Image: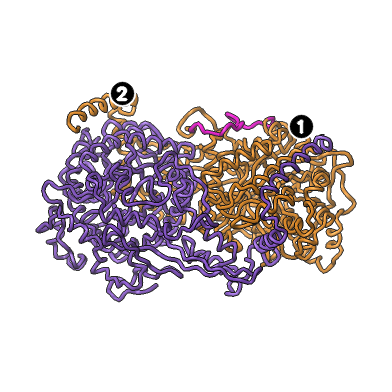
Chain colours: A orange, B purple
Amino acid sequence: MKKDKTPGAEVISRDPFPKSKKVYIPGQLHDIKVAMREVELTDTQDRFNNKTEKNDSITLYDTSGPYTDPDISIDVNEGLPPLRNSWILDREDVEELPSISSEYGNLRLNDHSLDELRFKHLKKPLKAKAGKNVTQLHYARKGIITPEMEYIAIRENQRLEQLYKGEDTLWKQHPGNSFGANTPKKWITPEFVRDEVAAGRAIIPANINHPEIEPMVIGRNFLVKINANIGNSAVTSSIEEEVEKMVWAIRWGADTVMDLSTGKNIHETREWVIRNSPVPIGTVPIYQALEKVNGKAEDLTWEIFRDTLIEQAEQGVDYFTIHAGVRLQYIPLTAKRVTGIVSRGGSIMAKWCLAHHQESFLYTHFEEICEIMKAYDVSFSLGDGLRPGSLADANDAAQFAELETLGELTKIAWKHDVQVMIEGPGHVPMHMIKENMDKQLKECHEAPFYTLGPLTTDIAPGYDHITSAIGAAMIGWFGTAMLCYVTPKEHLGLPNKKDVKDGVITYKIAAHAADLAKGHPGAQYRDNALSKARFEFRWEDQFNLSLDPDTAREFHDETLPAEGAKIAHFCSMCGPHFCSMKITQDVRKYAEEKGLDNEEEAVQEGMKEKSEEFKQAGSEIYL
Amino acid sequence: MKKDKTPGAEVISRDPFPKSKKVYIPGQLHDIKVAMREVELTDTQDRFNNKTEKNDSITLYDTSGPYTDPDISIDVNEGLPPLRNSWILDREDVEELPSISSEYGNLRLNDHSLDELRFKHLKKPLKAKAGKNVTQLHYARKGIITPEMEYIAIRENQRLEQLYKGEDTLWKQHPGNSFGANTPKKWITPEFVRDEVAAGRAIIPANINHPEIEPMVIGRNFLVKINANIGNSAVTSSIEEEVEKMVWAIRWGADTVMDLSTGKNIHETREWVIRNSPVPIGTVPIYQALEKVNGKAEDLTWEIFRDTLIEQAEQGVDYFTIHAGVRLQYIPLTAKRVTGIVSRGGSIMAKWCLAHHQESFLYTHFEEICEIMKAYDVSFSLGDGLRPGSLADANDAAQFAELETLGELTKIAWKHDVQVMIEGPGHVPMHMIKENMDKQLKECHEAPFYTLGPLTTDIAPGYDHITSAIGAAMIGWFGTAMLCYVTPKEHLGLPNKKDVKDGVITYKIAAHAADLAKGHPGAQYRDNALSKARFEFRWEDQFNLSLDPDTAREFHDETLPAEGAKIAHFCSMCGPHFCSMKITQDVRKYAEEKGLDNEEEAVQEGMKEKSEEFKQAGSEIYL
């Protein structure tokens, strides 16, 4: 791994991907440069006709940010360059505050024992000017195409519109089934991004205090996104390790990262993570609020929660999971479940509601929460506190009652021009997944769905990245906009680095499988390019086009170590005589010589006739 | 691992599963004992009411055979006890041959340089008496319930019918959607097994020369099964290692094993594998036939292939993959594919057809093949030689033309009372999977479908157990009877022991997720039991009920090593204050005290009213 010279940075992963270089595509409406990854391919060797064909390089959607660009020097103590600074300031609707507003934030700031731990270059927080609304939803509804929106349009297209040259092999794509989604036929335009955001069908998590992000969109009509969770939890790790956890997750494809840290110093840790994160950061503020009352849910108050929202909003958290749908009256609906309430936030609020026998303060203060969110453009991720924790509890009264309430809250948030996505289950057998999607679209007025899995069976602890990838791929196909990853350690313990990578790659698979099934424009291009490379024994290209080049290469070399073998026209699975692809090449050559490949229709006709004969003959011979 | 004293056996895995004991359930129609695994559970500690509740032990379907029974001593040189010997002989329709019939088999037998390598206790082969048909399909059509059929009925029920005591928590199960399958409402009866086999909807792979197997069934209306492939391929491994590969695969749940060995000495290796295998063994005879002509497909002849079928049938192979649907006229349909013909058997036959410009000898000699199959009860696995090797080639003319031919061949095989299943793809995006299942059911008259994956994307070499598990779970739900596993090494190299286990566990997940979605009777029982254990912090029970207790336990202990921690009422994921399950238990207690859990309906009513009020209020406050 390439090392950075600054203290604490030695643990940060910075290697570029093999045969890949960072490219930056300029905008047309705005002065922006959209980061992508370009993979260089080798030539096709046509041994039959003794000629070589060039293969165009392929551009991929890239979540890894500046970390994979060797030309950019990064100092985790400085944080990333604030890409969006001028975009935000040029709108002239924000003001720099003299100091941070939250009581707790100031408490930490004035505690000099924390100076060592504290991010060195704290900036003053930005906030909407009085009477201003700075959300992307607000701009979209005003018809404004922000730089963020243009950035997203260019990013989603992955330069495919430039590569496109008619319907050749690489452009083969099956028409998908997107279940009535409004997916564009060809490319994403800035106008389309604006329209989807304005309609509430998509969100752009982009806190004005997180200018470091490369904007991304979460919506049913865009590429399916994935989220990775990081956090120190009980076991505390160093701040650099926390930053590296985020860097590691986005390296493999996490589109957003949720910081679920719960140890002490989470305020300081969060600052480091946000300052160094090119992707939106989400949190569950109730976790920190609970820490402030020493873990006693019944001691929580609106004031403490409110101060926590402001504390985190001014640090730059891009979306908050808020379990405002866990209402007092729904809690008894969980009493007869097999696994009760398994959402942490949900169970905390349930305990509070019962302790006070009062309606949740998240619900009763929802409008005040919206006022805070819109002053910083923090998006809602309305939490599913009553999601099922086992197949047995799937799609029950408690879960769906909460979902209906989340739909009501969505309308309230939209009234304030606050962006909203909705969190979903959980544990659901395959045949009950679509009901979740359909009900969410209906009850929540097409606000983006953000689901955890769902897990399709409970019997495989240690493999829940897989039990859930099955459900995730399906619900993504049905219309879920973002999939929250599950690691192999789910239900068992804290994920390590390998678990995080396994979870992210597994969810990239689920998300891409969903894009293919939806027929997202150009989604199949990478599959075709990799399959062509595979068929032509361009091993290096096959590795480099894959989601995880390191593992693909390592697995291949494990059985065939020699460099020569990689270019040899057989692989160890089949051996020299058994390479079906070699035989197929011979077949193709043979067919070409005989001109058979130009007779498809004729042959199909002949086929039908033959099978007719066969049936007639059959009716005599065989019956 | 427990070691066996006999030479060559030191590598064989024989550890029983934790807290598990082998149980044998007697038959009622026949003198049989059906092997299963019983998992003992700990008591539930109800801390609130200071009492303990007993949890019934759970019986699981067990593919591991005698290897996990410490009371049975196994010598790989002797082979397993021939469970079915008397069943087969009592039918009085078979005769013992004076010697093996195949030319090649005799060639090997008389080669004394192989004596060292040769299985020590070769028995004379059995064959149907002249004019007799010894297939399970033949018996079923005659209305006979064989011991195999009763064994299967008892085995499929996993003693659930004995455990059943009314609709308590553990019996909660969502009504499934089996897409019009004929899945029984309650338990499997021997009559039902016979009827499904007679209808051709299910097969019992059970060669009369493989008496060692514990009978199993492959059919849409039974538990979904999985197959694991083993083989030495180019890299040769010792015979004991080959046997252990099979033992290792069935330990984790492989219902059948295909021996795809292609090195030299495969004749001898196969004998060892079959003699020690309690599960049906499948092969692709064309691979060995090709070896006999030094890998030159064009040199293949019907006579060489025929001799290979007899050679393997007399060793006891239970099903043959035969690519008889690759017809000359279909081959040009593949010429414009992205990945041509990727099935090894398919490409071998394609090459032969083109070399001779003749119809495939597998197709023209199909009736003679049936004559051989029925004399030993070898089942057909009609190979999909033209399956797509990439998403781009999915569901194309070549693939479906072959499928139609397989349907024609199915009828011919059935005319001979030969059992048939049909092989399926391959690489297919999610939204095109159901078309494969529907067309197979229609064209092949409901003969069982046996699919490879399908892989739902091509971009993740190194993770194709996952890309394919998504498709496998879905097609299993739609009606596929057996899923052929894919390992992480697919497309890259030879699977090692870890890869085989990963592939098997991943496919057990897919198969079980399918059973749940189909609503197979009792399928959810294990999920409920594990979820209840999870909710009650019975960690050991959670591990022991899982598909892979070793990994679940190891992952948990990795972050919480202390024994105490396992029984502590929190896990490292959340930490002491954040254990949502602990909070839920408090919530439940609270709800019980307030008697709220008896007010579900009332509360739901109240809920509706409240939300009405809310909307009315809303219409004033919010609009």
- A60 or B148: which is nearer to us? B148
Residue B67 position, x and y percent, is 34, 67
- B245 or A166: which is nearer to us? B245
A176 falls in the magenta region? yes
Which quadrant would the C terminus of chain B be assigned to in this image? top right
- Amino acid on which disc 1 is placed: Arg
Badge 2 crowding class, 10 Å Cα cut-off, few under 14, some 14 to 19, many 20 or more, is: few
Relative to B68, is A20 on the left or the right?
A: right
Using the numbered discs, state the Cα–Cα distance from disc 2 to disc 1 in whole angstroms. 56 Å
In which chain is the residue bearing label 1?
A
The answer to which quarter of the image holds residue B346 is: top left
Instruction: Look at the image and give the residue range highlighted in magenta.
Output: A173-191
Please give the name of the residue rendered at 29% of the width and 27% of the height, measured from the top-left corner. Answer: A607
Residue farthest to the left, as pictured = B98
Which quadrant would the N terminus of chain B be assigned to in this image? bottom left
Relative to B211, is B392 on the left or the right?
A: right
Q: Earlier in the sequence, mark 2 or mark 1?
A: 1
Badge 1 crowding class, 10 Å Cα cut-off, few under 14, some 14 to 19, many 20 or more, is: some
- Amino acid on which disc 2 is placed: Glu
Q: Which residue is mark 2?
A: A605
Please give the name of the residue rendered at 59% of the width and 44% of the height, measured from the top-left corner. Answer: A37
Report whether residue B402 is seen. yes
Residue B154 position, x and y percent, is 35, 57
Residue farthest to the bottom, as pictured = B5
Which type of secondary structure does the marked residue at label 2 adopt? helix
Residue A141 circle label? 1
Residue B590 position, x and y percent, is 71, 61
Report whether residue A6 is seen. no
Residue B139 circle label? none
Please give the name of the residue rendered at 12% of the width and 58% of the height, measured from the top-left corner. Answer: B96
Q: Above or below — where is B408 with respect to B603?
A: above
- B564 or A349: which is nearer to us? A349
